[in-house]
Amino acid sequence: MQGFLHRSIPEGNTWEVKTIKLESMEKIRIFCKNTNRNYEVNPGTTVEDFMKNINYDDGNMRVLAAYVNNELKELSFEIYLASTIEFLTYADSDGRRTYMRSLNFLLQRAIYDLFPNRKLILSYNLPNGQYGELRDIEDSTLTYSVSEEDIAQIKARMQSLVDADTKIIKTKKSNAEAKRLFLEHNQKDKARLLESIGAFFTSVYYIDGYGDTFYGPMLPSTGYLDRWDIFKYNAGFCLRSPDKYAPYHLAPQTIQSKLYDIFQENGSWCEVLGARDIGTINKAITSGHAKEVINIAEALHSRKYAHIADLIYQKKDKIKLVLIAGPSSSGKTTTSKRIALQTKVLGLNPIVIAMDDYFVDRELTPKDENGNYDFESVYAMNLELLNDHLTKLFAGEEVTLPKFDFAQGKGTLTGDTIRMHKDDILIMEGIHALNPALTAKIDDSLKFKVYASALTSLSIDENNAISTTDNRKLRRMVRDNNFRGMGAEETLLRWDSVVAGENRNIFPFQENADIMFNSSLIYELPMLKYFAEPLLRRISPASPAYAESLRLLKFLSYIVPLNPDEQSAIPPTSIMREFIGGSSFKY
């Protein structure tokens, strides 16, 4: 048979596609995981053509991308070797990310058309979508207040591009050429990032002549973007996308003002440090200012801990229990200890109880729908024992605290023996601390509730926000490896169960907090890269976690790591020491 091989060959500062005729090429074998069947195809067949040739249909769930040999690929990817393919829809994490990248690009294209003197800033993810603002194209600190009329225009322009089913075209450009393009669009963050990572070429995508980059595979065309909406949110707007667990419907339109405020506060902290994007942090590190960044970030944390302690002290005559909740790897344990120190300065006597010590024995842990242990469930806690201990403590009785051995999966009553006295205050942390079921027998007037999470407002660039979930995932991976006898592969494979548990048991209660604490630190991703990158590289290409390890490695490739000398500036009381070791606290 005859075939054609398409290769990108450098021509000056650009890449052009050259078509090379191949003689007598044999068909290649493809195993499709979705159908559990083998197929033979011509070399050079795209993933999308393969899908059409085998008449693959996943009902109403449109295929958005695919794993080819456990590596995420666009539907336009050409196959030349025997491969295993798995089609991805919105029900899959990488399918959702591909959809969201493309949706953000669609929004960016509409903004470019409608508001030539403004630029889009996608700051962070809210529970019901992604928050965005329009800033002055020359001075990105000046925010343009978006009106309902503006929202209507943006929606209409986006829909017109969707109706036209405009192709999303991928190209490769030299970094110098890509940098010139981004500077033409006044995307200084993007240009600065390109300078800091030192790559030779960058993927640039085009919609109707407008080019941009989004650091991952995109959809073939705008016609795939059939479910989205925008609504006005404070000075900016929220871009809604399909719900993760009900992809036929948009995520609920809800307002969570406390969460929004904490993101805004973190953005202000970033402004204090003179950095809101990875490129700026990279430049600070390479310029020798890493320790200064660490010191300022830690000082900001200390001020927040002191503020929380002041609020508790103001109500010392009533409050007996401080509850600190948050999702996995939000730094709840260190947060509880730092708040305890600050309350002690004010004359209170804090007693810290770790909720993790109240797990039931591993064999009694409830299981999720896949038959795996659901460690994130509130019923993985020994609720009866916990409430019994709290009731006795508030009655002035003495109790012996439990101690949980994570390696053995067993709990024993071998912890400290404690009794509460005048001016004592109990501090308890855990992922379920704001769930009423946890302390159902304790009167609410005795409680002060704190929600902690790593809610970074640091972005990759102007329209590529950093996922706070990824931040926590890297934290947990490093901690699990250092202290819990668990490799990176196992951490990644358990993560979906962790997130599902958080959506059931943690996030619904976060707005019940009296105050929110943002545990993220602007230097932590450079720090985590140093520890996480080697762990991720150990994951085998045959592992189900391989695709995720590649995604995280690509993300980390944009970041300049902190070296050991720079890490020595991290104080022993820092929340980061909970994950990397060297803490002066006992965990």
Image: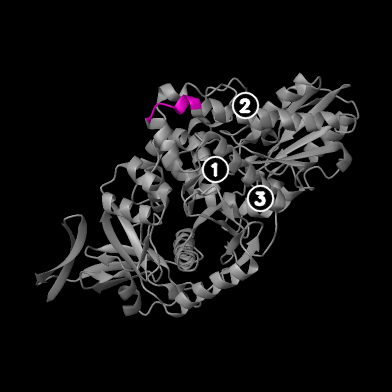
Which quadrant would residue 146 be assigned to in this image? Answer: bottom right
Horizontal and vertical percent position of residue 112: 45, 64
Left or right of 110, for residue 170 = left
Q: Against 579, is 259 above or below? A: below
Residue displayed at 59% across by 64% down: 245
Question: Which one is nearer the viewer's eye here, 478 or 125?
Answer: 125
| Numbered disc 1: secondary structure | helix
- Locate residue 525, reporting x and y percent: 47, 38
Residue mark closest to the camera, 2 vs 1 = 1
Q: Residue at x 38, y 60 (%)?
A: 217
Residue 466 appears in the rendering? yes
Q: Quadrant of the C terminus?
A: top right
Q: Would residue 497 appear left or right of 338 to someone viewing this image?
A: left
Is 573 drawn above or below residue 13 in the view shown? above
Whether residue 576 is in magenta: the answer is no
Q: N-terminal of the two: label 3 or label 2?
A: 3
Q: Residue at x 38, y 29 (%)?
A: 287
Amino acid type at image mark 3:
Tyr
* Span highlighted in magenta in the image: 287-292
Q: Residues within 10 Å of mark 1 (few under 14, many from 20)?
A: many
Identify the residue position indicated by label 1 in the image: 472
When the figure is inspected, residue 106 is found, relative to residue 557, above or below; the finding is below
Disc number at residue 587? 2
The amino acid type found where label 2 is placed reads: Tyr
Q: Which residue is mark 3?
A: 260
Q: Indicate whether 22 appears above or below 378.
A: below
Residue 413 image offset from top left, x and y in percent: 73, 28
Q: Earlier in the sequence, mark 2 or mark 1?
A: 1
